[in-house]
Amino acid sequence: MLKSILKDKNVKSIINNDIEYFDVQDIKDNHPELKIDVKEIVHINGTAMITAQYIYVTTEFDRMIKQVFPKDKK
């Protein structure tokens, strides 16, 4: 996904070693239309972060799967 789109959505980010990383928890909590490649998550100062190239817009299939297999909130 383009960094400019993520910036427009106000996804939290930091720059580390000249690379911009986006906050995984912010994406999970505030942007249900986005999904991430969990294999590409890195931890910076104890926070899960990911680069823009591994963030995608959810598809209709993704939304259908979430309805069929909802997450248990305990």
Image (cartoon, rainbow, N blue to C red):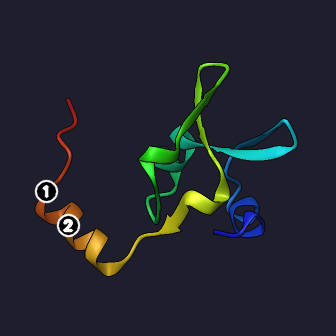
- Dot 1 and dot 2 residues touching (CB under 8 Å): yes
Q: Where is residue 34 in the image (x, y as percent from the top left)?
A: 49, 62
What residue do we see at 87% from left, 43% from top? 18
Q: In this view, does 40 lie above or below 74?
A: below
Quadrant that contains the C terminus? top left
Q: Quadrant for residue 24, please give it.
A: top right
Q: Which of the numbered marks, if any, corresponds to residue 69?
A: 1
Helix, strand or loop under label 1: loop
What residue do we see at 66% from left, 58% from top? 52
Q: Is residue 16 above or below residue 19?
A: above
Image position of 50 (left or right of 69)? right
What residue do we see at 56% from left, 58% from top? 54
Q: Position of residue 9 (x, y in %)?
A: 67, 62
Question: Mark 2 Cα within 10 Å, few/some/many (few <14, many 20+)?
Answer: few
Q: Residue furthest top?
A: 46
Q: Which residue lies furthest to the right in this view?
A: 18
Q: Nearer the viewer, residue 1 or 33?
A: 1
Amino acid at pointer 1: Phe
What residue do we see at 13% from left, 56% from top? 69
Residue indicated by mark 2? 65
Image position of 7 (left or right of 74)? right
Quadrant that contains the N terminus? bottom right
Q: Nearer the viewer, residue 52 or 72?
A: 52
Helix, strand or loop under label 2: helix
Q: Where is residue 40 in the image (x, y as percent from the top left)?
A: 52, 46
Number of marks in the rendered image: 2
Q: Which of 21 and 10 is in front in this view?
A: 21
Amino acid at pointer 2: Ile
